Amino acid sequence: MVRTALPTLPVLTEDAALNPARIAALQEEVRALARRREAVILAHNYQVPEIQDVADFVGDSLGLAIEAARTPSPVIVMCGVFFMAETAKILNPERTVLIPDETAGCSLADSITVEQLRDWKAAHPGAVVVSYVNTTAAIKAESDYCVTSGNAEAVIRAIPADRQILFLPDVFLGTWLKQSLGRDNMEVWMGECHVHAGIRTREVLARQAAHPGAELLIHPECGCTSQLVWARNTGRLPSATTHVLSTEGMVKRAIASPADTVLIATETGLLHRLRKEAPGKTLLAADETAVCRYMKQITLPKLRDTLRDLAPAVEVDPAIADRARLAIDRMLAIRG
Ligand code: 13P
Ligand code: SF4
């Protein structure tokens, strides 16, 4: 592990509730510490608004990996969940990668173990293993390709049609890819993200009916994706305004869409960025209860403490990192 040789900074305590003045003061503190540490702050689109607003870069999983690969900063702070910080560390083994709360996990990443993957591979010799980025470093090390929702279609298309594919761990993303690309020789693991799995077809259709003419943007991890795509393909939903997209794709589409109202079927944290980048539009969650508590574990006081203490630092076993990097590099080479 390489850490920058900087002096220990004073210990502060954070008891106060985060009112606007406190948020502004903490953000100033965070920016000052980031300058002192020469740190870059990366934040996922699902982070709380005050973290997004203090970050150097806010984006989807693919964007975060791209930024982590190209930043010259000696210190990277990942405001997201643990697999995102692990990915940044794998891409930057010589740098300090920090995460403000190392217990920020992911139900989807937890839905497959290395032993299960090894058994699955043994049952399908010769198959190409494609793992969603929401996986542990150890799972990536057992994979041929890594993908995100931003480039999964392009990566699957790049694999010769006669090669069997084992796709993991998200059953909804995998099923949508299999159906939309007509890839019959693709086996899909039965994992899910509890947040996206809980976004139900009935509620999304009701919300869409209440806002006729609205753009409906669906994340492929949603439990309702296949049914909504079927509704679109059979004319129940308008094809021009119903799209399956990564969170970054949703931002681009919301900005470009001629519709005044945009409904998003994903984690509600994205609304903050959308409201900044598509200010003239009415931006609504298809399901307001779609909140990832793991993402919300990252708070300004924790971010401040992380920059102050240069901890918690993320470590990945170099042998695992070297193998995982191959799959991640393939993901970065095919951007969709
Ligand atoms: P993207 O940001 O890649 O669309 O993924 C969403 C997600 O659930 C990340 O945890
Ligand atoms: Fe994981 Fe779902 Fe949270 Fe994304 S929203 S970090 S997939 S639990």
Image (cartoon, rainbow, N blue to C red):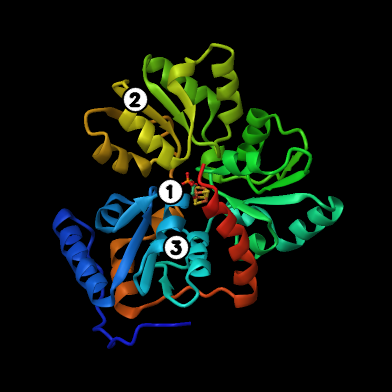
Q: Secondary structure at mark 1?
A: loop
Mark 2 CB within 8 Å of ligand 1: no
Find residue 82 and name its label: none
Identify the image quadrant of residue 37: bottom left
Amino acid type of the residue tagged 1 in the rendering: Asp
Q: Secondary structure at mark 3?
A: helix
When the figure is inspected, residue 265 is found, relative to residue 209, above or below; the finding is: below
Q: Secondary structure at mark 2?
A: loop
Task: Tell me the residue that label 3 is attached to.
Answer: 69
Observer-nearest of 18 and 106: 106
Structural crowding at the residue carrying mark 1, measured as other residues with C-alpha within 10 Å and reported as few (<14), some (14–19) or many (≥20): many
Find residue 257 and name its label: 2
Identify the image quadrant of residue 26: bottom left
- Which percent across, then down, holds residue 291? 43, 44
Q: Residue at x 50, y 74 (%)?
A: 93
Q: Kindly report which numbered mark, 1 or 3, lies closer to the viewer in this rendering.
A: 3
Mark 1 CB within 8 Å of ligand 1: yes
Q: Residue at x 70, y 29 (%)?
A: 182
Observer-nearest of 23 and 236: 236
**Nearer-N-terminus badge (1/3):** 1
**Image position of 190 (left or right of 281):** right
Amino acid type of the residue tagged 2 in the rendering: Ser
Structural crowding at the residue carrying mark 3, measured as other residues with C-alpha within 10 Å and reported as few (<14), some (14–19) or many (≥20): some
Task: Tell me the residue that label 1 is attached to.
Answer: 60
When the figure is inspected, residue 253 is found, relative to residue 298, above or below; the finding is: above
Observer-nearest of 93 and 16: 93
- Which percent across, then down, holds residue 18? 23, 58
